[in-house]
Amino acid sequence: MIDRDFVEINQINGFLTFLWSIEWRDPWLIGLCIFHVSIFTMAIFTRNYGNFQALLFFFLLLLVYFSEGINQLASTNWKIFSRQQYFDSNGLFISVVFSMPILLNCILMVGSWLYQSTQLMTNLKIAQLQEKLKKEQQEKIIKSKSE
């Protein structure tokens, strides 16, 4: 069932034409871009704070999960905050402008976690090997003194 308030996307010829058709000077779109930049900055600067990053990651995934509901709400109330009706029935606009940047930030966080994990495992293995070498050297010293 297609709602009358939704815009059909069968006139879209390509992704670039879709992006060029968006009026990026709309104040709410500027605010959305500022939101995405601030989330990206927050994800970068808090990469060493695991608990905060986990909460941020969970919050961002919740936003993506509820994007369909946000799309429906925005399609019925678009005149309040926008100059044009962008919210189509398939959710293309909200997926491209809202969900995709959020998911890219989530991928950035997961990549950071994987990098930190590999660094931690490398440091742990180096410490284990150094401890083993130290014990072997001590055993050699004790063995040489006893002979």
Image: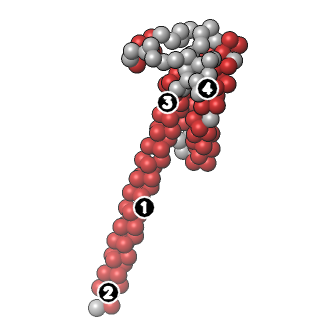
Give whichever of discs 4 and 1 has the lower sequence position: 4
Quote the CA–CA distance across marks 4 and 1: 47 Å
Give whichever of discs 3 and 4 has the lower sequence position: 4
Counting other residues with Cα less than 10 Å from the Cα at mark 3, is it few (<14), some (14-19), or many (20 or more)?
A: few
Out of 81 and 49, give the one closest to the viewer. 81
Give whichever of discs 2 and 1 has the lower sequence position: 1
* Residue 38 in sight: no
Residue type at tag 2: Lys
Viewport quadrant of the N terminus: top right
* Residue picked out by circle 2: 143
Q: Position of residue 72 (x, y in %)?
A: 64, 26
Residue type at tag 4: Asn
Give whichever of discs 3 and 2 has the lower sequence position: 3
Figure coloring: secondary structure
* Residue picked out by circle 1: 124
Q: Position of residue 56 (x, y in %)?
A: 60, 40
Q: Residue furthest bottom?
A: 147
Q: Is residue 50 above or below residue 36?
A: below
Residue type at tag 3: Met
Q: Nearer the viewer, mark 2 or mark 1?
A: 1
* Residue 109 in sight: yes
* Residue picked out by circle 4: 71
Quote the CA–CA distance across marks 3 and 2: 64 Å
Q: Quadrant of residue 16?
A: top left
* Residue picked out by circle 3: 100
Out of 45 and 63, give the one closest to the viewer. 63
Q: Quadrant of residue 62?
A: top right
